[in-house]
Amino acid sequence: MKIILRGLGTATPPFYIRQEEAYEYFTTNFILKPAEQDLYRRILLDGKIKGRYLGMDAKTDALEPDPDRRLARFLKFGRTTAVAAARRALAEAGVETDEIAGLIVNTCTGYLCPGLSSYIAADLGLRTSIRFGDLMGMGCGAAIPNLEAASGMLARNG
């Protein structure tokens, strides 16, 4: 079976922070041992990445101790960002939502029940009979497993 990637969509959450701001925030708001401070400096300041988009309304959201509020924030931003990216991918591929037979979602941020895929499918208006796959805790490292899971879905659907 030949599988072709026909569309790719990207999206980012609305809050952007420069690496220098993130480093300053960590060193100001958290008690860090010298080794930890050095690690954050290397991660945030020594690379080519200039900034990050975060699923937050403000920097102070990073200090939120309530797990229910953190999950609500994940649902809000994960959902809207994923739906925006999916709509772009569908448009680029020239595919209508009624043609979708499966949905694979990957995240390392939060754990929802039902999975994030269920919310995305509802927001996109996908059929309730599609297959779902939520890969949790893998982050960027799940690119290949995502493609493998999707190709398995396609192969099973014939």
Image (tube, rainbow, N blue to C red):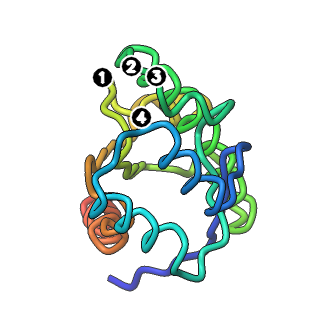
To which residue does mark 4 refer?
116
**First along the sequence among labels 4 and 3:** 3
* Mark 1: secondary structure: loop
* Mark 2: secondary structure: loop
Q: Residue 61, how many percent across, how many down? A: 56, 28
Q: Which mark is residue 102?
A: none
- In this rendering, is residue 6 above or below 112? below
x 59%, y 39%: residue: 55
- Cβ atoms at labels 4 and 3 below 8 Å apart: no
**First along the sequence among labels 2 and 4:** 2
Indicate the amino acid at tag 4.
Leu
To which residue does mark 2 refer?
65
To which residue does mark 1 refer?
113
To which residue does mark 3 refer?
64
Q: Where, by quadrant of the figure, is residue 97 drawn?
A: top right
Indicate the amino acid at tag 2.
Pro
- The 10 Å Cα crowd at callout 1, few under 14, some 14 to 19, many 20 or more, is few
